[in-house]
Amino acid sequence: MIYKAIVADDEKELRSYLKTLLAEVWPELEICGEAANGNDALALVVSLHPQIVFLDIKMPALSGLEVASRINSDCHIVFVTAYDQYAVDAFEREAVDYLVKPITKMRLVQTITRLKKKLQAASLLPSNLTEIITHVLANLQTQAKTEFLHWIKTQQKDATRLIPVEAIDYFQAEDKYTLVMTAEGESLIKKSINELAQELDPQQFWQIHRATIVNVSRIENVSRSFTGRGIMKLKKRSESLTVSRNYLHLFKRM
Amino acid sequence: MEQFTTRTIKVGYIKPVTMSERIRDIFTNRFVLKCYLYTIVISTFIAAFFSITKPEISFPVYFCVSLSYGFIYSSIIMFLIWSIKPDRIINLIWLYLVGICLGVLIGYQAKILILQYVFSVVTTKTVQDFFVEIANGFVFGGGIGYFINSQAILRRRAKDIEEERIKRLTTEKESLAANLKLLQAQIEPHFLFNTLSNILSLIDTEPTKGKTMLVDLTKYLRTSLSRTLSETTILNQEIEMIKAYLNIHKIRMSDRLRFTIDISDALRQQQFPPMLLQPLVENAVKHGLEPKVEGGEIVIKAFEENSRLRIEVRDTGLGFSDYNKTGIGIINVRERIVMLYGEKGRLIIAENEPHGVSAIIEVPLHDL
């Protein structure tokens, strides 16, 4: 039986390189299609029903992992990655086939031997592969998700700007919107204070009031007012902010 | 590391210290006790001096009298300074004089009372006596004042040294961190391995193209590795390196990447810090064009504006949608601009019309 395979990689040279290598170590294999991005790869799998898919992880549109999680048909997937320690660890753990770039002939022979064995045993796609992939994907995404907000997208006059959070003195709620205060001026964003409180790094930004989140590094001092609330002065700013009682514990003496 | 962070926070709170704050600082229980101890020593000396020059009255009498004098003086002066906390030297001197006058008035009465009731010695009040008392007062007041002042100076020195130390530690830490980040920012393993794969594949099919790519990679690696620690280079070097970097990507992405670099020869000779522009280009490729199916264009331009050097890296990529992932590279650029130029330099990240990102570095042109 002649097996069919698809090679998906956004780099033309690397596709042809893998094809040359495959022709050397497994001449009977028919490369029935090539894809330069995730969408094309998925379309090819659906239309050509290959038994084997070589998927680069980093591709435009859909990543290799995303493509894999959407493949329903019965095929063996070999992931290809240049450098992604997390993914490689995950594959190793879950016993998924993978190749690292630059692909060496020796490593490819290993993979092919394993593939042939699986194919000859007529073993079907491991039923839990989709599950495994979703698992790997979820893992990788949580890794990405713990990242805090680095940039605030604002509208200034007619241009959209990205402001790095380090440049922000404080956020002040203004009806449904939020005012972003920087040394250079102020701008409105649509995110609410509560959303921001979730997404900003709590080491760097403290909520000091229902309507205020302040950049810790800009605090000059905090004093107590007669009413029991705190009054906060910021560096290089004339206005002072109110620290409500609920948040005063942040400024207790160490 | 932990220590460093707490110190940095502390530095943030240091303000110029006013005199009244300094006074508040030095008035501790220990200080007051020391002051009284000093008073006892001075009193002993004075009593000894008088019992030698005027032996008709015994030492214990002199000692008792001078001791009571001393306590009254030091208490009054300390109380006045502590309660009023003058904020200027001239006010401190006035307080001193008031303290001494009060001390003389009260002390003189106390002396008469002690002599009369404790030692049954009756004294007559003479004008001459009164001047002697005032002279005594100044001796005492001067002693106590000198003591307070020397303590204050000592404290201040200790504090200055501590502040200096904190400052030094902070700057050391900052420059260390900046260097570290510079190192981190340099070579992305993904890029390196992908490039090597490409070269490997080109060796067989198109050896000349493979050679060019290898030369470009070498150029990129050499410049990005060797200049890490040098403060500035000329812009041209940075541009040459970026060109090598983009050439490599050009082979990888073929017609999905187009780029133009438009910078005059004069501006290319300008001094410019290494690895400041490269992260912007890397970003444009990695988060703008690479993830975009049809690719796009990068334009790098530099111009002079109000004696500032303005370098723009514009791409037609995916825009802000992929931007929050960029993280460290660009943030480092911003931090380094702030560190190198303070408020004179800046990084602007804006949306490019109709799509993509435009990143602009502005630095002062002549004092680099």
Image: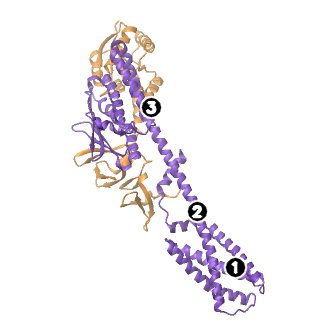
Chain colours: A orange, B purple
Q: Position of residue B307 (x, y in %)?
A: 29, 46
Q: Foreground: A103 or B4? A: B4
Q: What amino acid is found at the position of numbered circle 1 in the picture? A: Leu
Going from N to C along the chain, the mark reached first, 1 or 3, is 1
Q: Residues within 10 Å of mark 1 (few under 14, many from 20)?
A: many
Q: Foreground: A237 or A83? A: A237
Dot 3: chain letter: B
Dot 2: chain letter: B
A95 shown above or below A217: above
B163 shown above or below B249: below
Residue position marked by numbered label 1 in the rendering: B67
Question: Is residue A74 in sight in this rendering?
Answer: no
Residue position marked by numbered label 3 in the rendering: B226
Q: Secondary structure at mark 3?
A: helix
B289 shown above or below B13: above
Q: What amino acid is found at the position of numbered circle 2 in the picture? A: Arg
| Direction from residue A94 to residue A72 in the image, left or right | left
Disc 1 and disc 3: Cα gap in Å?
A: 74 Å
Look at 72% across and 90% down and name the residue there.
Answer: B116
Q: Nearer the viewer, mark 1 or mark 3?
A: 3
Residue position marked by numbered label 2 in the rendering: B155
Going from N to C along the chain, the mark reached first, 3 or 2, is 2
